Image (cartoon, rainbow, N blue to C red):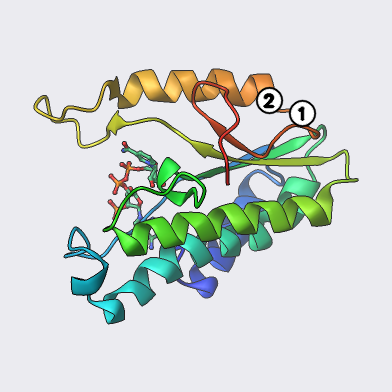
Amino acid sequence: MDIGSTESVEHAAAQVEDEVGHLDLLINNAVLSALGMDEDFLHADMDSILETFNVSALGTMRVMKVFYPLLKKGEGMSLIINISSEAGSITKCYRSNYLDYSMAKAAVNMGTMTFYNVTKEDPGINIFCVHPGWIRTDGREDNPAPLSSYDAAEILRLLFEKRRYDKQGHRFITYENEDYPF
Ligand SMILES: NC(=O)c1ccc[n+]([C@@H]2O[C@H](COP(=O)([O-])OP(=O)(O)OC[C@H]3O[C@@H](n4cnc5c(N)ncnc54)[C@H](OP(=O)(O)O)[C@@H]3O)[C@@H](O)[C@H]2O)c1
C-alpha cells in the first residue's frame, strides 16, 4: 500500500480483513525523506517537506486509524509499534539539518502519545514508538552503522515481546529497551 494515500490504506485494510480477519501486531516502519535535507535549516527547501510529512508522519497515523478495527478484533492484546528515531526527540535534538525527517518523527511520537491517551484504558490494545538503532538497512558493507537489518529485526522482535503487555511504562523506547525522552 501507499501510506501517503488514505484510499490505498483503506484498500489494503479491506484486503487484510478478507484474508485474515484480524491483526495482532502492526509495525509502522515506512519512511520518506526529501532530497537535499542534509542542508542546514537556513538552506533547506521548505516546500519539499510536505511530502515527507504526508508519508512519514500522517501515513503512520492513517495506517493506525484505518487498521484499528482489525487490531480490535485480535484475541489478546494487539500491539502497534511506530518505528521512530532518536532524531524525533525534541529534548535531545542536536542536528541543524534533516529538518523534514526530524519533524516527521517528532510528529509520529506525538501521534503515538495521542493514540495512547485514547486507548489507555483498553486492555485490548497497546502502543509504543521505538528508536530502532543505527542499522545498515541499505545492506552495504561500507555503511558504518553497527547493526545489520537481520540483527536489528531479531533485537526488535524480542523487545516487542518483552514490552507487549506494558501499558504503564514510558512510550518512547530504544532498541535497548531504554526510555528515551520525547
Ligand atoms: N536505518 C537506520 O539506521 C534508522 C535509524 C533510526 C530510525 N530508522 C527508522 O527505521 C525505519 C526503516 O528505516 P530504513 O533505513 O529501512 O528506511 P529506508 O531504507 O528508507 O526504507 C523506507 C521504506 O519505506 C517504504 N516507503 C516509502 N514511502 C512509502 C509509502 N508512501 N508507502 C509505503 N511504503 C513507503 C519504502 O518502500 P519502497 O522502497 O518501496 O519505496 C522502504 O521500504 C524508518 O522508519 C526509519 O526512520 C532507521
Q: Residue furthest left?
A: 142
Q: Which residue lies at the image location 46% right of the left edge and 44% below the top edge? A: 92
Q: Kindly report the distance in space between the C-alpha atoms of the residues bearing marks 1 and 2.
A: 5 Å
- In the image, residue 6 sits, relative to residue 93, either above or below, namely below
- Type of amino acid under label 1: Asp
Beta carbon at label 1 within 8 Å of ligand 1: no
Camera-nearest residue between 6 and 128: 128
Name the residue beneath numbered marker 1.
Answer: 166
SS under mark 2 = helix
Residue 27, horizontal then vertical, whole percent: 54, 42
- In the image, residue 20 sits, relative to residue 76, either above or below, namely below
How busy is the neighbourhood of tag 1: few (under 14 within 10 Å), some, or many (20 plus)?
few
Name the side, left or right, on which 142 lies relative to 169. Answer: left
Name the residue beneath numbered marker 2.
Answer: 163
Q: Where on the picture, by quarter, is residue 159?
A: top right
Name the side, left or right, on which 149 lies relative to 56. Answer: left
Mark 1 touching mark 2, by CB under 8 A? yes
Q: Which residue lies at the image location 52% right of the left edge and 67% below the top edge? A: 58
Residue 36, horizontal then vertical, whole percent: 16, 65
Name the side, left or right, on which 140 lies relative to 48. Answer: left
- Type of amino acid under label 2: Arg
Residue 65, horizontal then vertical, whole percent: 67, 62
SS under mark 1 = loop
